[in-house]
Amino acid sequence: MADQKHLDVTLETQVESVNLAEEMCLRVAEAAGFDEDDCYRIGMSVREGVINAFHYGNQERPDKKIYLAVELTTDKMVIHVLDEGKGFKLEDVPNPLAEENLLSTSGRGIFLMRSFMDEFDVVSGRTGGAEIIMSKKLPGQNNHAPNGEGGQSAAPHQA
Amino acid sequence: MLDLSGRITLGEGSALLRSTIRELLEEKRFKILVNLGDINYIDSSGIGELVSAFTTVKNRGGELKLLHLTKKVHDLLQITKLYTVFEVHSDEVAALRSFDAAVA
């Protein structure tokens, strides 16, 4: 109800959108009372989500848009990053911690978002592109994930 | 020694690191100690650029080592398992000596 706050922003597919999205979400996170470490994790995750949309989703094409949405519910901050690409499946993303991928120069964004946020998922969005949905519990909320993981201990799921 | 400051992120930071490494290699400087003491923020693009620099220098027969990691950068290299890839030093003199030791 009145406790829920929502912000929707349409971003251009350009490098500057990455910093812009990070700064906007940092303001929201700070206002919501997250401490410095959590603000860093949220800011980094938003960066990685928008970089993913910019580079992999929209293929850096300026005619495509990136849609950022932030919701503050009573217990968590939820961030959506939607692109206009072809979408992807999480299980197709290589594990950056695998020995053969350690020296890869890319492919760590999804891992970082998963590591830094409490919840993370990728679904097919209304544009047909990938929609990243990730959240962090508000300060003071119970931070235990059902499986005892969560926060920094989360690791990429591998088949 | 290459002193970096600020952020290594998509765009300027990553591009600057790439061009600087390229210039050092063109000058035949193959032993590179990258001081990250004033770097408090690296994103996945910056990590990729560091890895790229590491492999580029190594492929040219050189060495790239890291000095003075801030806590955030240290933690980032830990969770991405890159701490085991890079040779990381906290003492500048020892770091510089380690290059000589490798030659001897």
Image (tube, rainbow, N blue to C red):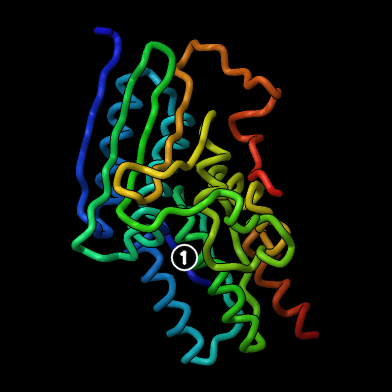
Give coordinates of residue B6: x percent, y percent: 38, 54
Given residues B78 and B28, the one toward you in this image is: B78
Name which residue lies at 80% across and 85% down: B104
Name which residue lies at 32% across and 50% down: A83
Given residues A25 and B14, the one toward you in this image is: A25
**Element marked by disc 1:** strand
Q: Quadrant of residue A72?
A: top left
Given residues B2 and A55, the one toward you in this image is: A55
Chain bearing mark 1: B
**Residue with the most extreme top position:** A2
Residue A27 versus residue B11 in the image, above or below:
above
Give coordinates of residue A40: x percent, y percent: 44, 36
Give coordinates of residue A104: x percent, y percent: 59, 67
Name which residue lies at 26% across and 43% down: A67
In the rendered image, the quadrant that contains the N terminus of chain A is top left
Given residues A76 and B97, the one toward you in this image is: A76
Q: Quadrant of residue A85?
A: bottom left
Residue A65 versus residue B28 in the image, above or below:
above
Q: Quadrant of residue A134?
A: top left
User: Does residue A151 appear left or right of residue A20 in this picture?
Assistant: right
**Count of numbered circles on the image:** 1
Give coordinates of residue A35: x percent, y percent: 44, 24
How packed mark 1 is, by other alpha carbons closer than 10 Å (few <14, some 14-19, many 20 or more), is few
User: Does residue A64 appear left or right of residue A97 in this picture?
Assistant: left
Residue B52 versus residue A17 in the image, above or below:
below
Name which residue lies at 48% across and 91% down: B27
Query: The disc labelled 1 sits on which kind of residue?
Result: Asp
> Which residue bears the numbered disc 1?
B3
Residue A68 versus residue B31 in the image, above or below:
above
